[in-house]
Amino acid sequence: MTQSRQIHLVRRPQGMPRADDFAVVPVETPDAAEGQVQLQALFVSVDPYMRPRLDADQPLDAPMLGSGIARVVQSRHADFKEGDLVRHFSGMQERFVSDGRGLQKLTPDPALPLSVYMHALGGTGITAYGGLLEVGALKDGEQVFVSTAGGAVGSVVAQIAKIKGCRVAGSTGSDDKAAWLRDVAGLDAVINYHKQPLASALREAMPNGIDVYFENVGGEQLDAVLPRMNVRGRIPVCGMISTYNGERAGVKNLSSMIYSRVRMEGFVASDFPHLNAQFQTDMTGWLKSGQIKYQETILDGFERAPEALVGLFEGKNAGKMLVRAAE
Ligand SMILES: NC(=O)c1ccc[n+]([C@@H]2O[C@H](COP(=O)([O-])OP(=O)(O)OC[C@H]3O[C@@H](n4cnc5c(N)ncnc54)[C@H](OP(=O)(O)O)[C@@H]3O)[C@@H](O)[C@H]2O)c1
């Protein structure tokens, strides 16, 4: 037995989630039995998709759903040895036992920090890559606008579009993130949507209209973008974070899709297994060459996962929000 902790949802949030909707629950993790491994969480992912699940799908008083990177600390399983690193979808558990199903062995490139496998080389990276290149059918030199451009998905989308020779603008919610996007990531224009009226800021930022709008926010930002879309424009719909706490700002400009022949298409990260090998090669190269830069907001301590999740909806993260549970 090993002393461990789990994060439980103890109350369904009303609107914005609060840290005390969750509890850090002490548990005892059994030793690995024959055919099992015991794992120790290293990084815990917190992601916007979790919020809608808190309304119904996530059971109360049970480990929060979620993914992460963990280390094998005991092995009685033929396919794993102590010290192996794995990706898992076993939820927010500091230690846990597994029969190996659903574990994905990870062999990180020694020249890159492990944390990048939680974002640029992980789920948010493939979301950005597949969403922009396949669903958005990006062509070199196009006009691209990205919402939540300072976040994990958005910052990668914006930089892939720059690599493809596009003019790229993005929206974000703070001056610090805006400065990073302009000065470090090399965007052509950045809108702080808390300070600038969207319609006029978009006209200025995208004087030649928008061929691809990478949609992460919905609501008012989508509404402001729709009339700026060029003919045969594409809107890969990755997320609509402005609606996840129950707000439903009306979108009034959908009819502008008709004459501009715009295609809007939703997708999820798991739609792109056929792109994975090329994605890993491209992204590893871009990270090593410095063509893709990243920010991370890492909260130290497993018990800080609720704070990290709430922080996503307060815009507290620059780049990927992560919890480091152990070194
Ligand atoms: N389809 C998929 O498979 C998939 C996979 C991963 C992510 N996603 C979606 O992609 C989007 C970004 O996810 P991420 O993991 O990269 O998170 P992220 O952008 O790193 O973090 C969330 C950011 O959203 C912004 N935000 C929060 N509440 C907002 C609101 N009410 N209005 C406007 N912006 C708000 C905040 O940044 P600022 O306010 O500073 O901009 C916050 O930092 C989300 O919509 C998510 O659901 C989809």
Image (cartoon, rainbow, N blue to C red):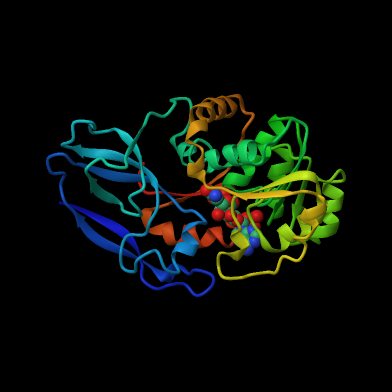
Which residue sits at x=71%, y=30%?
164
Image quadrant in which you'd find residue 252: bottom right
Along the line of sight, which residue is nearer the eye, 260 or 30?
260
Which residue sits at x=58%, y=38%?
130
Residue 324 appears in the picture as rendered: yes
Along the line of sight, which residue is nearer the eye, 111 or 191?
191
Left or right, 293 with respect to 121, comes to right
Measuring from the top left, give residue 249's x and y in whole percent.
Answer: 68, 69
Q: In which quarter of the image is the C terminus?
A: top left
Along the line of sight, which residue is nearer the eye, 243 or 33?
243
Q: If the picture is divided into quarters, which one holds ligand 1? A: bottom right
Residue 294 appears in the picture as rendered: no
Left or right, 262 with respect to 203, comes to left
Left or right, 212 with respect to 110, comes to right
Left or right, 6 with respect to 171, comes to left
Which residue sits at x=32%, y=60%?
63
Measuring from the top left, give residue 2's x and y in whole percent.
Answer: 19, 51
Give above or below for 120 relative to 2.
Answer: above
Which residue sits at x=81%, y=61%?
197
Measuring from the top left, give residue 258's x and y in whole percent.
Answer: 78, 54
Measuring from the top left, give residue 281's x and y in whole percent.
Answer: 52, 25
